[in-house]
Amino acid sequence: MRTGLWTVVVSVAFAAVGLMSYEVASQAAKPSRAPTASFKEDVFPIFKGRCIECHTPGGKGFEASGLDLTSYAGLMKGTKFGPMVIPGDAQASNLMALLDWRVNKKIRMPHGGKKLSTCDRDAIRHWINEGALDN
């Protein structure tokens, strides 16, 4: 009787391991979700309303840093000091450090202006975390 019970327990355990392996394999095989944040529709309008006045060729912000926010290519080129966006990692992106005011008061963005709303900053953060695509 004990042998029969032991066989059932071992069979159930192997079945559970097999099921877990199947679940892991099926999760890995699923394609990643399509991005929900759009540069064109979610991020660029924020730049247009709050940033482009200075960060356009000839503007004060452009002259000081080299950052051109009039296009995706300009943003991704970064500044004369380095990259602004690390796709997939908003926390490490210089853009978010500037917008979240995690930097010296003298370089917070928008410079000399009111901090972007939490909603606007979260939209940019979300876009970066989804890979900062040109979409």
Image (cartoon, rainbow, N blue to C red):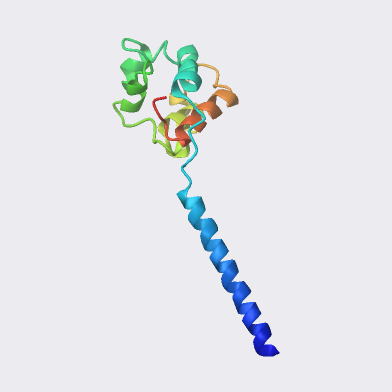
Most extreme residue toward the left is 80
Quarter of the image where the C terminus is located: top left
Give the residue at x 48% y 56%.
25
Give how far across and how far down residue 70 sits, in percent: 37, 15
Give the residue at x 55% y 22%.
115
Q: Observer-nearest residue: 3 or 99?
A: 3
Most extreme residue toward the right is 1
In the image, is 134 to the left or to the right of 14? left
- Residue 114 in view (yes/no): yes
Give how far across and how far down residue 134 sits, in percent: 39, 25
Give how far across and how far down residue 90 sits, in percent: 46, 36
Give how far across and how far down residue 97 sits, in percent: 46, 32
87 vs 50: above or below: below
Q: Observer-nearest residue: 79 or 74?
A: 74
Quarter of the image where the N terminus is located: bottom right
Give the residue at x 43% y 25%.
107
Report the number of numbered marks.
0
Give the residue at x 50% y 53%.
26
In the image, is 112 to the left or to the right of 10? left
In the image, is 54 to the left or to the right of 116? left
10 vs 64: above or below: below
**Residue 73, quarter of picture:** top left
Q: Observer-nearest residue: 24 or 18?
A: 18
- Residue 112 in view (yes/no): no
35 vs 67: above or below: below
